[in-house]
Amino acid sequence: MCGIIGYIGKREAAPIMVEGLRKLEYRGYDSAGLAVLSGGRIAVRKCSGRIQDLQSHLAENTPSGVSGISHTRWATHGPATDNNAHPHTDHSGNIALVHNGVIENYQSLRDVLEAQDHVFHSDTDSEVLAHLIGYEYYKKTEPDTQERLLDAVRAALRWVKGTYGIAVLHAELPNVMIGARLGSPLVVGLGKGENFLASDVSAIVRHTRDAIYLNDYDLVAIGPNDFDVYSLDGGAAQFEVSVVDFSEEQAELTGYPHYMLKEIYEQPESVLNAMRGRLSIEESTAVLGGLNMTAQELRTIDRIVLTGCGTASHAAMVGEYLIESLARIPAEVEISSELRYRNLPTDRDTLMFALSQSGETIDTLAAMREGQRKGHRVLGICNNVASTIARESDGGVYMHAGPEIGVAATKSFTSQVTIMTLLALTLGRMNHLSASDGKTIIDELKAVPEKIRTILKQDAQIKKIAQKYARSKGMLFLGRQFNAPIAQEAALKMKEISYIYASGHPSAELKHGIIALVSPETPCVFIAPDDSVFEKNVSNIEEVKARRGPVIAITTEGKTELERICDDVIYIPKCPDYLSPLLTIIPLQLFSYHIAVELGCDVDKPRNLAKSVTVE
Ligand code: AGP
């Protein structure tokens, strides 16, 4: 996944683009570059490394001009080198392009172009697209016009198999910039006497909140004071101007050392936002208008399939327990990258949910499309409004968590679990849950944000425990029932930001092989709240202690007996079993965060990772 921002207007483009790239750095950060239309030619500056490396590179000579395109890269084809950084130009040097996505047939296209004496300077698929646009453009000899460039981009994209979000400049056309998207997000920002193209609005929200989220197969031509949206097949395309629902400040660090810590601390608010306006006290149920399903339609559902990747799949796993426990409907989780290729037998009354914070994860998008291909209704649970999954799904529930910039998902997880709870409540109240049961669930849900605040107050103590175990060679996370998925989620957090090998398992799996890993160097973290399987977890803790394994326990206030057998104990407030994942994950997010900081890791931009995996 990469970040793109283009500017065309009356101000110097370079500083606006560099500031915008900083907001997009979470999308990829192994190389960066920009191209500015300067003095009738395309001036390109690019290098491997981060945005600050590009800024040093620019310090000597920043190109001056009022239109430009820029890019921060997460490598898909070719290593992170200066030549592979974007922008790329065509063989004439008059056309520059930045690209987010994957051109799957780039090699065959490159062969055709090389046979036409095109010379390439990089290993990337994106450079092939730049040359293809140049090839199509210079086939003609008519005057340089916007139409000619649009036609060349359209013709080039028709050759392409794969995904793209692009911005294109031509040296002879100072008042136009072309954008196009298929499978990778691209948004138009509408300013006053200036317009923008960007991968997401966080790059441009400082300048404008009026945005057009392009659809797949859309092309757009923007100038300083105008824009036109077209479809790839030639005609005008439908579009709507949205108002961005968060401010630049919300997307800023606001005093926290890392976005991840900020987003952990936002969870009392983000969990509240996930349920805001969705709890009906008088009907003792949840109200999820976005499902686009009548009560009769919901009533017929006899199987639910939940799909997602990474943290989203762990939220789905909690959802499986919630739906089966509260709504008594069979539910199963299928990892999206598997589901998209599986021939999962499903019947008519199967309902699918696609969980995705970014709404752009290619595997989840493909799994959703496979479900729709089978005629199923697929509902999206996304954070990014107008993301591809949100727009292509048959309805769904927005998380309203605000921008999640840290690569490690935190508030998006608890928001997804909250929505899973609302869904289970809705379905449960259509089956066997009484009004009184529903009221109890609602009261307990409303108490969750304050309980999260209580846990966050223990941050300093959790930090001390984290520092004690920061140099472990490996870690095991163990939990049962509603907290078995929490063991996996906590292990993922640890792996992705501290690079410590960690794995999560149902506690009872210890004796089926996992216990061979127990040693004084391998702490076990037990998620053992005061629930129906607490005693079973205590037995597992004893097994580990008998083998001199260090044990950290996450348990409920009052269960002080664990202090006798555990090395460290972190307490959470009392809550029903089915809501405990919303609380047990909080200390574990902080635990992995503080270990990563202690180890000097780049918490917000961990190595090899990107915030959303929009390429296969
Ligand atoms: C989680 O911390 C990771 N960033 C990753 O597993 C992520 O959850 C996964 O890529 C799914 O992303 P999505 O929710 O945007 O689809």
Image (cartoon, helix red, strand yellow):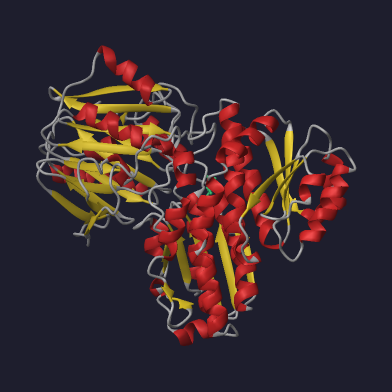
Single out the residue that lies furthest toward the bottom. Answer: 296
**Residue 519 in sight in this render:** yes
Residue positioned 77% across, 63% down in the render: 533
Q: Residue at x 12, y 22 (%)?
A: 39
Above or below, 440 against 391 in this view is: below
Find the residue positioned furthest to the top: 60
Q: Position of residue 261 (x, y in %)?
A: 48, 39
Whether residue 615 sits left or right of residue 544 in the image: it is left
Question: How many numbered discs?
Answer: 0
Q: Is residue 547 left or right of residue 74?
A: right
Residue at 81% x, 60% y is 535
Q: Answer whether residue 138 is visible to the viewer in this image.
A: no
Q: Report the residue that reaches farthest toward the right.
A: 546
Q: Quadrant of the rendered structure where residue 47 is?
A: top left
Q: Is residue 270 left or right of residue 528?
A: left
The image position of residue 86, as x and y in percent, is 36, 30
Indicate the quadrant containing the N terminus: top left, top right, bottom left or bottom right: top left
In the image, 68 versus 469, the foreground residue is 469
Q: Which residue occupies the foreground of this view, 568 or 227?
A: 568
Foreground of the two, 218 or 449:
449
Write down the quadrant of residue 550 in the picture. Answer: top right
Left or right: residue 218 versus residue 105 is left
Where in the figure is residue 253, as x and y percent of width and height?
38, 37
Residue in the foreground of this view, choosing between 65 and 201: 201
Does residue 282 sit above or below 318 in this rendering?
A: below
Residue 266 image position (x, y, % from top left) = 44, 48
